[in-house]
Amino acid sequence: MSSTGENAPKEFVYPVEVEKLDVGYPEQRVLLEKISFKVAPGEIVGLLGPSGCGKSTLLRHLVGLEPIKSGQIRLFGQDLWAGGGVHIDSLRRKFGIMYQGGALFGNLNLIENVAMPLKEFSNLPQGAIMVAARLKLSLVGLEGFEHHLPSSLSGGMQKRAAIARALSLEPKLLFLDEPSAGLDPVTSAGLDGLIVTLARNLNLAFVIVTHELGSIMTTIDRAILFDKEKKGIVAEGTPDFLANHSETLEAKAFFRRGSNNSRTTHA
Amino acid sequence: MPLPLAINKPLELTFTADDTVALQGDLDATVPAKVWDKLLKRPASASSASIAPSKSLTLDLSGLTVLDLNGAAQLLWLKSIFEKKEMTVSIKDVPENFSPIWDLACRTLAPRAPLPSKDTLIETVGHHFSDFFKDMTALIAFLGEVIANFILLIPHPLKVRWKTTLAITEKAVVNALPVTALVAFLVGLILAFQAAMFMKLFGVDIFVADLVGLSIIRELGTLLTAIVLTGRSGSAFSAELGAMKINQEIDAFLTMGLSPTRDLALPRVIALTLATPLLTILADFAGLLGGNVVMITRGYPVSVFWTELSGHLSTSDLGTGLFKSLVFGFTVAAIGCQRGLATGSGPGAVGEATTKGVVTNIVVLATLDSVFAVLFYVLNW
């Protein structure tokens, strides 16, 4: 298992700290019990597991969309659920999120989508906001598409634009929900490359919910594997370690398909 | 009101000698626009304490405590403004820990591509006209396609989806009975009341029965029914078919070799075309009932109203009304379906298609009604 935050400075605040958290919707059964993990600055952490194990619910807890049952979530050292709506809103400025479908605003073009958070929350001059939005779009490889509506772009481009929007307020933490879902391998690899580049260049921490083994192996620094039956974390470490050296049955089952694929490829 | 971003160290500008401005503090999204006003609106002839206006400017970044991409974007924006004024701007002493960000920003931001030029007024008007004619062509082509499909199915009546047609008739027409009857009753009531007030002055308020009868049976009953069906059923057709288009169900129909016009639109068109006259008869009756209620309140027995009415109404009055309702039913359903099938892409497309369907229907109904009025006058029907 790798130590967390190899790229992080010696003294730092963890962007994400989860402690003894019960994951689940109110009035419903607990999906994951007493889970704990941390995410260091600049680290790319993958939340893995079979469908229905509670990954997406955990993500909703982490971004403040779903109240927690018990336990604690600290973002940048502050307890997310300790205060009311104003407290959660102030913490939400410190992270960005990319939803599975991109969730761009369909009636705004790309530059307006990316500029919107800066227009809402900052007092920057209009010209500077537009330059900043153009900069973010260029950073994700969408220069020249500033005036396109989201509906005129491919799925991969929409996801890139959604990342650009998530970067609008320069957060140090990004949550990505299934970034590779529905993308072809080449586009998916391009998106993986972008995630690694952003993490390394901007020291961004990423928390990624994903199923794609290809993306997991090439992108993620540390994988956290959840299990539906055991209702908790069953394995944690680098994807390479989990795929090749982990003795955990669930890890072997999860990564087996990847190993089989690679054998077929080499045959 | 959104919360403002938290500021740690506010950015300060210090004007030093040699056309240099020192920046100290956090250069990020928390910088207020007014900070740059000091730099952008400096006087043409500067005092000795501030920088003298010249053709060059140096920004000293050594005092920055934060520099992120939003901060770098502000510097690039300033550079572009001064460069437009033919001034050269140089950046010096970027702190070592921020130089990767500054290099990344400079490397990433390509020279600004020219914005797409906006259309002139004539071009805009031309585009609108062109779009309108394309739209009308598509609409007329679709109406023709529906009629052709209907004619082709006449020798094979069992191929019509009668089960679907009956279900649509129930949903779109039978369920619309109460609202149509209520609207027609109230319109008959209002019409009779307004007319009676005036006609009483001349002692001819008995003719209110004829006025209400002719208006309702020849015009209003038909038109009101069609408008209610437009709002209630035509829009539902647009929304249903629009949602199917967005979900690629229409594509699935086409790739399976099926015709959306024959299998989706035609049952709706048949249902509304055949059932609208029946609904119109009910609306006519409700409207007349409204008029009758007013006449009763003015002291005329029920039989007087109906006797007066039967003396002046002919079968051609009823025939023209019902003929129009047949055409209106066809129009409302066909236009609703066409707008639904022509739905574009994007989250607002279904709403847009529904709105377009309702607006087109109302305009077409009013136009057709005027045409029929002239036609029946000329034909003396």
Image: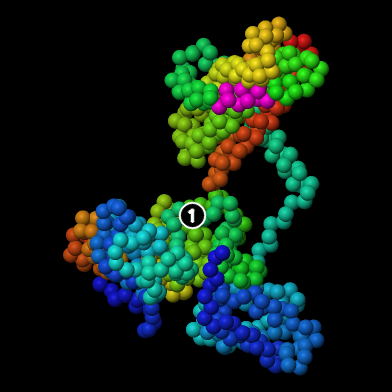
Is residue A71 shown in magenta?
Answer: no
Residue at position x 70%, y 21% in the image: B192
Q: Position of residue B8 (x, y in %)?
A: 52, 81
Report which quarter residue A9 is drawn in.
bottom left
| In the rendered image, the vertical position of residue A140 relative to residue B44, given as above or below | above
Report which quarter residue B368 is drawn in.
top right
Residue at position x 65%, y 11% in the image: B301
Q: Position of residue A188 (x, y in %)?
A: 42, 58
Please indicate, yes or no, whether residue A81 appears anywhere in the rendered image. Answer: yes
Q: Which residues are magenta?
A: B179-190
Q: Position of residue B25 (x, y in %)?
A: 56, 84
Look at label 1 and name its amino acid. Ala
Secondary structure under the numbered disc 1 in the rendered image: loop
Image quadrant occupied by the C terminus of chain B? top right
| In the rendered image, the vertical position of residue B137 relative to residue A17, given as above or below | above
Task: Name the residue beneath numbered marker 1.
Answer: A103
Residue at position x 62%, y 37% in the image: B356
Q: What chain does mark 1 sit on?
A: A
Q: Position of residue B326 (x, y in %)?
A: 61, 18
Main SS, magenta residues:
helix
